[in-house]
Amino acid sequence: MSTSEATAADAQFVRPEHTTGLPLTRMIMAVAALAGAIIAGYMLLYKLGVLASIACGTGACETVQASPWSDFLGVPVPLWGVAGYGAIFVVALLGIQPALAADRRVAAFLFFACTYAFGFSAYLSWIEAVRIQAWCRWCIASAVVATLLFLLALPEIGRMRRRDA
Amino acid sequence: MATKGGSGPKAPNRKAPPNAPNLKAFYALLALVAVVGIGWISWSVVNRGGGAATDPIVLTGMENAQALLERAQGVKAGNPEATAQVIVFSDFTCPACGRFTQFIEPQMKTEFVDRGLIDFTYYDYPLGPEGVHRWGFIAARAARCARDQGTFWEYHDLLFGRQPEWSYDVRRPPVDRFIEYSRLLALDADAFRDCLESDRHADVVTANRMLGDQLGVRGTPTLFIGGRSIENWSDWNAVRAAIQGQLGPMPVPADTAADGN
């Protein structure tokens, strides 16, 4: 193989700088968001009465779900979760497609949505600890997912600032 | 055209870069998470609480009064040998029954049950399935699941005492609340759950309700003292007088007699 051929072939392997490491964080983000949507969906089914009981172990999911804080702006909190995680899932999937990987709107959405999810989850955890004084294990699981998403979204700050190629 | 091992121009290499994440593996992982998650939720919908009997069942052969009496099963307190029989038909979702439990039963217990003077029997008469009485049947079953672990009366008091907490939300059976109550009474919550999320005791609760219908019960609580229905169940003096009427002349306790002298 000649030197020029090797250069041409290797060029296929070289990703632009702005996409380096991009797919992996967004892939994990998509998996985490899907898990979050499933957790929120499970709680939503319980909230709507489709599920007669919720697997809660030693927690107090029923108490949390029956509290006045289980609705936000008139909408059940788990429905916010399904919508939020669902949106992050879809955009993270789009974000690993070559055509959109470098799109700053994708990066911006992922960063702000994950930051909002993290903040909202922290607020709900505070409500559980201070106001309701009861913990729901699924809410904790959702908070862990939201925290993970937030950490995974931090690199999106740099991606938002980069100029499109 | 590129040839194998040839020296001509190569076709573009479509292989992923060595450090690129494997998309196939990623999509497989996503599919796995989705399948496991959706499967788990579906299983939950089918099994978790879905098996809890919340309505009366069809009992055959109950036209025969004797068969019905054998199937119906009250919960007794006091002295089964006592000649004075007091029977109450009650529903855990009924606020009036809650008042009866709060104000009349304790006095009856102190004066007559604990002293072994009466044979007191509690029968279920779930009023549902409409409205706020929707969960009367499963509540009656829950109390009997607690009875399986020897705590009927404690659970009975808890259900009436916390009635607003569990009976108002008619969207779903309060299975979790009832399990939470079982924990409050230090019952084996897993065994309690197994009982509640089944149709156990559904036959007895149904038979109790049918027995009440046959005896002319039209509402709750209905109190029978010596076979006679007592309209004024909320008046303790009237209830006490009716019980004493069944007992006959009461022996005067020695300490009271001494005080009187």
Image (cartoon, coloured by chain):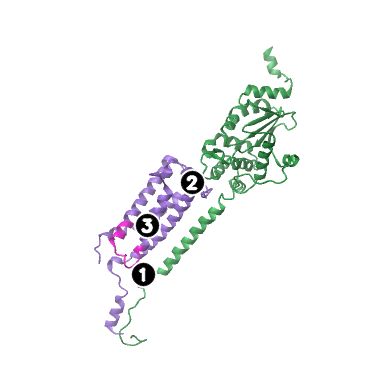
Chain colours: A purple, B green
**How packed is label 2: few (under 14 Cα within 10 Å), some, or many (20 or more)?**
many
- Disc 3: host chain: A
Dot 2 and dot 3 within a common chain: yes
| Residue where numbered disc 1 is placed | B20
**Does the rendering let one see residue A82?**
yes
Label disc, if present, on residue A88 of the rendered structure: 3
The span from disc 1 to disc 3 (Cα, nearest Å) is 22 Å
Bin the neighbour count of mark 3 within 10 Å (Cα to Cα): few under 14, some 14-19, many 20 and up: many
Above or below residue A157? Residue B230 is above
B85 to the left or right of B160: right
Q: Residue B132 carries which label?
A: none
Quarter of the figure with residue B151: top right
How many marks the image carries: the answer is 3
Of the pair B194 and B173, the residue shown nearer to us = B173
Q: Could you tell me the amino acid type at mark 3?
A: Ile
- Mark 2 lies on residue: A61
| Distance CA(mark 1)–CA(mark 2) | 41 Å
Give, as a three-letter code, the residue at label 1. Ala
Residue B218 on image: x %, y %: 63, 33
Q: How far apart are marks 2 and 3 (CA)?
A: 25 Å
